[in-house]
Amino acid sequence: MSNIFPQGEFYKIAEFVYNGTENCRKYGNQAEVAFTYMNDNRPELIWMTNKDDFNKYFANTTFNYDIQVQPKLPKAIVLADDIELAAKRILSRHQNENYAKYILVISDFDLYIPANMSEVLKDLMDINNIRFEALQFDEYYDEDKSSYQSDENYFEMITSNAHYIEVDSVDSLYAAKLAIKLYPCILEETEEAFALAPTEHSSAKPLWLWILLIPFSLLAILLTYFVWKKYLRNAQNRIGISDKVSALPNDYRTLECKNWIIDDNHIVIDYSQKLGSGAFSTVYKGRIIGMAPVCKMVPSVVLQNVFNDCEVAVKTLPTFADDRAKSDFMQEINFMKSLVYHPHLVCMLGVAHQTPSELCLVVEFCSKGDLLHYVR
């Protein structure tokens, strides 16, 4: 953590990690956790398995918060060495393949690692089946951290499924979605097993109830199907998407509504101005030269004035994005096309080619930031 990060908030991080350990107990597993930090030269880590262990570790007078504080962004080589050391410490303690191994890096720095180091660390994690995740707080360390080009940073390549999670502050740790992404024992298979497990108080439903439920359920399914088909047909007629695209909404390569395409020579993407990033994508500032495609879809003098030679936000996928991320991105594009334009929603202006085979989503630029920061 940086020296700007408030020390009083650190214990919320410890509580978040403890809750993840307890979550493993809830699912019938055992877990042990150790905290480490930059330049940690201790011969052995202190491993914790329960609440008492956590309380003893952080309440002990020997625990020194300042020892893990960094005055500036750590050098890439030092960060890479410390991550490798953490992996080796886990492997030396748990060589049994039946044990799941997990490293979570938490920082308020925008951590940087070049391509060659990230490849070595990624191989280390993959070969030893170590899950690696990273969580960054954006709100605290405000100094200029980007002495490198954003497209040269390959830190997120090390993480599982290329996820680099960024949140505003420590208060975001209380969000359920963050726990689902980062807790070690929340898996789809585990959730399904517990959802289907009978409880002590469950009882068999009477036969007459099943007789009523089955036909009503079938009727509800049929009604939902016909309503959805009608909506899909209307959406296709409204925006001119072919049957092929609607039948294959997850195909990243299909985008047959050519009216939305922005020619390469009509858009400029400034990769040095990163507006934000999330688990699956990065948003850069850009500029459209000429009229945005949305003006052709919604003829309006107002839109033609606003979205002509204008600043835009460009949402892109990383080059190492997997098929699922590409599929989700294509779904998002198709959904925003179906909305076309609404004055109270961020408007999709068009799509452009980041590379000959990769699309990026172009939306209107919000100069005052998002609603949350504006309200604050």
Image: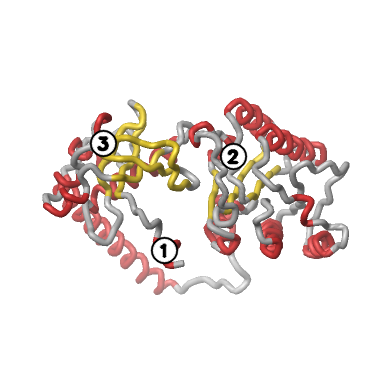
Q: Residues within 10 Å of mark 3 (few under 14, many from 20)?
A: some
Q: Residues within 10 Å of mark 1 (few under 14, many from 20)?
A: few
Q: First in sequence: mark 3 or mark 2? A: 2
- The answer to whether residue 26 of the structure is visible from this angle is no
Q: Residues within 10 Å of mark 2 (few under 14, many from 20)?
A: many
Q: Position of residue 211 (x, y in %)?
A: 37, 69
Q: SS for tag 3?
A: loop
Q: CA distance from mark 1 to mark 2?
A: 31 Å
Q: Position of residue 277 (x, y in %)?
A: 47, 46
Amino acid of disc 1: Tyr
Is 31 situated above or below 26? above
Is 370 situated above or below 304? below
Examine the image and state in which quarter residue 323 appears.
Answer: top left
- The answer to whether residue 68 of the structure is visible from this angle is yes
Q: Nearer the viewer, mark 1 or mark 3?
A: 1
Residue at coordinates 20% horizontally, 46% vertically from top-left?
294
Q: SS for tag 1?
A: helix
Q: First in sequence: mark 1 or mark 2? A: 2
Examine the image and state in which quarter residue 366 appears.
Answer: bottom left
Q: Nearer the viewer, residue 248 or 273?
A: 273
Q: Are marks 1 and 2 in contact (CB under 8 Å)?
A: no
Name the residue carrying label 3. 255
Residue 374 got which mark? 1
Q: CA distance from mark 1 to mark 3?
A: 34 Å
Q: Nearer the viewer, residue 215 or 299?
A: 299
Name the residue carrying label 2. 159
